[in-house]
Amino acid sequence: MIETISPHRPLMLGVVGDSAAGKTTLTQGLAALMGVSEAALVCTDDYHKYSRTQRRSLNLTALHPDNNYLDIVAQHLSLLRVGQPILKPTYNHRTGLLEAPDYINPNELVIVEGLLALVTPAMQRCFDVTVYLDPKESLRRQWKVNRDTVERGYRAEDVLTSMERRQSDSQKYIWPQKDAADLIIRFHRSDDQPEWDNAHLNVRLVQ
């Protein structure tokens, strides 16, 4: 539920969705519109407990709650909500390693994005507005392959294998978060639109 915002604290916006659903594109676009000095960006995927190598040995995916410090996420969101800064961890998606933390000031708008940003009631209570991005699965699959091969150095076949391995965790932990979102946004192509055209997509607001 959207509530009246106190003038003494930032507006908290949460953006959730599966991997490569468009979360970072949306949040960075909003931040650019607001201006760097007005918006603070936080990615909850930075709160991984384990490196990529450690996750493999533990048979955990990045989507599993046990791989993430969700209690620390909730604590940090609570601090940001009342205007307090945090020291946010940093996860390097290219190397799969944790790096030096970032100092985050809340500013007037805090935009939080991530796979599990709405997975617990404590985290849900920290937001004023929440959005779940729900692109058509074939579209998300293409975005995922394009992003992970170009930006993260993966082979396309490895990306597709990883998506298959993560599917059960997506269904169990990511998809149910749409029930906690204020808005659900879906992207899809027109029937006659070529697959390579990602610049002209149809957008549908579900709720």
Image: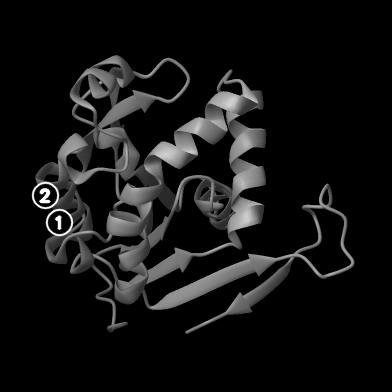
**Dividing the image into 4 quarters, which one contains the N terminus?**
bottom left
Q: Which residue is mark 2?
A: 75
- Amino acid on which the number 2 mark rests in the picture: Gln
* Residue pictured at 30% horizontal, 15% vertical: 53
Q: Name the mark on residue 78.
A: 1
Q: Nearer the viewer, residue 137 or 3?
A: 137
Image position, residue 123 (x, y; %): 19, 60
Q: Tell me which residue sits at (57%, 80%) in the image.
A: 205
Categorize mark 2 by other alpha carbons within 10 Å: few (<14), some (14-19), many (20+): some
**Element on which disc 2 rests:** helix
Q: CA distance from mark 1 to mark 2?
A: 5 Å
The quarter holding residue 57 reads top left
Q: How far across and how far down the image is residue 27, in percent?
A: 51, 52
For mark 1, give the secondary structure: helix
Q: Residues within 10 Å of mark 1 (few under 14, many from 20)?
A: some
At 61% from the left and 20% from the top, the residue drawn is 155
Q: Is residue 102 above or below residue 171?
A: above
Residue under the point 40% across and 58% down: 16
Instruction: For the residues labelled 1 and 2, say whether their Cβ atoms are less than 8 Å apart.
Output: yes
* Residue 93 in which image quadrant: top left
Looking at this view, is 166 or 97 the one in front? 166
What's under tag 1, amino acid-wise? Ser
- Quarter occupied by residue 180: bottom left
The residue nearer to you, when weighing 124 against 12, is 124
Q: Is residue 202 left or right of residue 45?
A: right
Q: Is residue 184 above or below residue 21?
A: below
